[in-house]
Amino acid sequence: MPGAPLCWMAVAASALFFTLPEPSGAQSSAPVPKPEVKAGDRWTYHRMNNWANRPEFTYELAVTFADRNAIQGVVTRKGGEKELDATWTAEWNAVSSADGGVLEGSSGLLKFPLEVGAQHSVTFDLQRPAVAGGRGAFRVKHRRTVKVIGWEDVVVPAGKFRALKIEANGTYERIDANLSGLVRSAYWYAPEVKRWVKYVYDDSYNKNGDELVEFKVQ
């Protein structure tokens, strides 16, 4: 189904470059630059089931390589499962995800520098292979309008952050099936974290997301 793969989308999913955080209550008009991600940076998230408002599992993303063009990392689900590779652009837009998803087209949900009021459109295809004992293969096209909404205070297990909210709303269409509908995702990007502290995804069949548990960046 057209859900968000582990730790992208966006997508993603995802935005990692260093600036000083705004103090709580302040809202800066200055653009937020692309983060300077480094090998060894890491983040731990709860994958949330937002239908039930509870964590489904916890995973860690550790960067193994980063330069001006790409970020490569290893995603490890807590509980002893094997490490899975994933790749993003330098702006945390997914190229390939840990669950085998591959994106084609303009998948730039995050477009740096981030500036309040900025807006752009993206279209991309997501293809995922069949998983033994699990879901089947599928291919889905997303058409989104991305807007940088503004600064908000966000509380997650890792603490309270001043974060820039980015919404990406539009439609999805299964290319391999007669299925389509509306889709919404949102990111709360915190510059000092070099990534989002919270992410939500919502379509007709999926209502999930990520919440930051802990992080270590250089």
Image (cartoon, grey):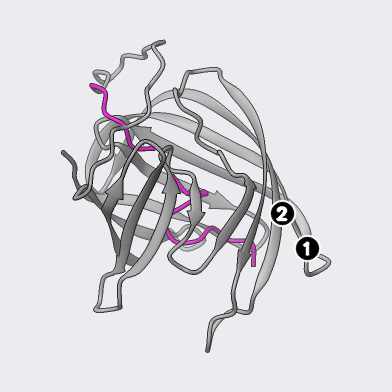
Lateral position of residue 99 relative to residue 179, left or right:
left
The residue that label 2 is drawn on is 141
Local packing at callout 2 (Cα closer than 10 Å; few below 14, some 14-19, many 20+) is: many
- Is residue 166 one of those drawn in magenta? no
Q: Give the percent coordinates (x, y) of residue 119.
A: 61, 24
Residue under pointer 1 = 175
> Image point 23% across, 42% down: which residue?
38
| Labels 1 and 2: the sequence-earlier one | 2
Q: Quadrant of residue 163?
A: top left
Left or right of 94? Residue 183 is right
Name, please, the residue furthest toward the right: 178
**Does residue 119 sit above or below 187 in this rendering?**
above
Could you tell whether 49 is left or right of 104 in the image? left
Task: Examine the rendered structure and indicate whether residue 110 appears above or below residue 99.
Answer: above
> Residue type at mark 1?
Ile
Return the residue nearer the eye: 91 or 182.
91
> What is the span of residues highlighted in magenta in the rendered image?
1-20
Q: Nearer the viewer, residue 179 or 40?
A: 40
